[in-house]
Image: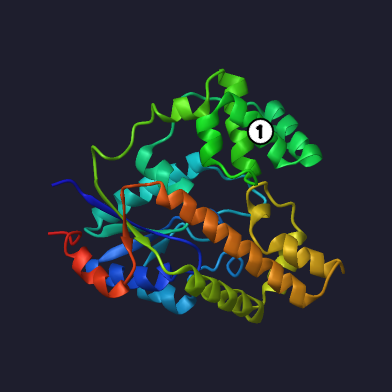
Amino acid sequence: MKPQIIFLVGPTAAGKTVLAIKIAQKLNAEIISCDSMQIYKGMEILSSQPSKAELKKVRHHLLSEVNPEKEFDVSRYRSLALRKIKEIHKKGKLPLFVGGSGLYMSIVIDGIFKVKAEDKNIREKLYCQAGRRGSLYLHQRLAKVDPQAASRIHPNDTKRIVRALEVFEVSGKPISELQATRVGLGNKYDIHILGLDIPRVKLDLKINKRVEKMFRQGLVNEVKKLLKLKLSRTSCYAIGIKEVQGYLEGFYGLKEARELIKKNTRHYARRQMTWFRKDKRIKWITDQKTVSGMLKVHCPD
């Protein structure tokens, strides 16, 4: 039998961490973070990393690995993740990926295209255009050259829009065409993807409670420290940084900063679910009591 890998995905604040620890304890698994912000040091509150008590229950990987000033991309994440998969299997344990980054999940499972389509000057030019004219302008450009990619990328997702346009300008081929040539892990591993789904009203309440907790934990001080650094293009997009910065610079009060983070997190959760809903490989969990029955399929011999 092929060695197994499990993914537990879903929107932010849905309760993935608590459920993942239960699954990991049941299956003798170790958890690999599948979150684009939890990889950064100094962003433990912003990225809602597991608590110290939770970290003691199950071994976690790829948390607080990279300085927030450093650029970090999906290619590097995949390289680190594949290494962790091998390490965990060698221990006789099961790798359990947990997070809300659909792109990170996809890049691990489906692979990355081999054409090296990178040009720093083109990338800088595109970011300047986004700054002057907005991400919607670039998204409209992308829709003309690669409508398939544009349909998958949100108009506000500047980083992915820029990357898709950069690939097209460097290679002359749409990124969606190149992605179709990727070689994934399906031949080597038995992969199972579970998605945690809860009603929108309940999720919104959980998001609001999480944001209030983040402020009690010291979110403002954490952001103050981060703003002293020259953050990378990825880390600076963490929800909470710009919202708290606006408060610190006197544009609005603390209450408005909290409400902005809640609103932007709710919008982000919607985008996450839009991504995951398109992946038909995901087995959705609507009642956590049914998980134990589903896990019988995944338990290693």
Q: Nearer the viewer, residue 248 or 148?
A: 148
Q: Nearer the viewer, residue 202 or 13?
A: 202
Whether residue 230 is visible: yes
Image x and y of residue 254, in percent: 77, 76
In the rendered image, the vertical position of residue 210 relative to residue 78, given as above or below: below
On the rendered structure, is 118 left or right of 249? left
Q: Secondary structure at mark 1?
A: helix
**Label 1 crowding class (10 Å Cα cut-off): few <14, some 14-19, many 20+?**
some
Image x and y of residue 95, in percent: 31, 56
Whether residue 118 is visible: no
Q: Hey, which residue is sitting farthest right in the picture?
A: 250
- Image quadrant where residue 285 sits: bottom left
As shown in the figure, which amino acid type bears the numbered disc 1? Answer: Gln
In the rendered image, the vertical position of residue 252 relative to residue 92, given as above or below: below
Q: Which residue is mark 1?
A: 140
> Residue sitting at 49 percent across and 39 percent down?
75
> Residue sitting at 44 percent across and 55 percent down?
34
Image x and y of residue 200, in percent: 49, 68
> Residue sitting at 81 percent across and 75 percent down?
253
Image x and y of residue 131, in percent: 78, 41
Q: Hey, which residue is sitting farthest bottom in the picture?
A: 216
In the rendered image, the vertical position of residue 30 relative to residue 121, given as above or below: below
Q: How is the image coloured?
A: rainbow
Q: Nearer the viewer, residue 80 or 195?
A: 195
> Where's the C terminus, which quadrant?
bottom left
- Image quadrant where residue 227 sits: bottom right
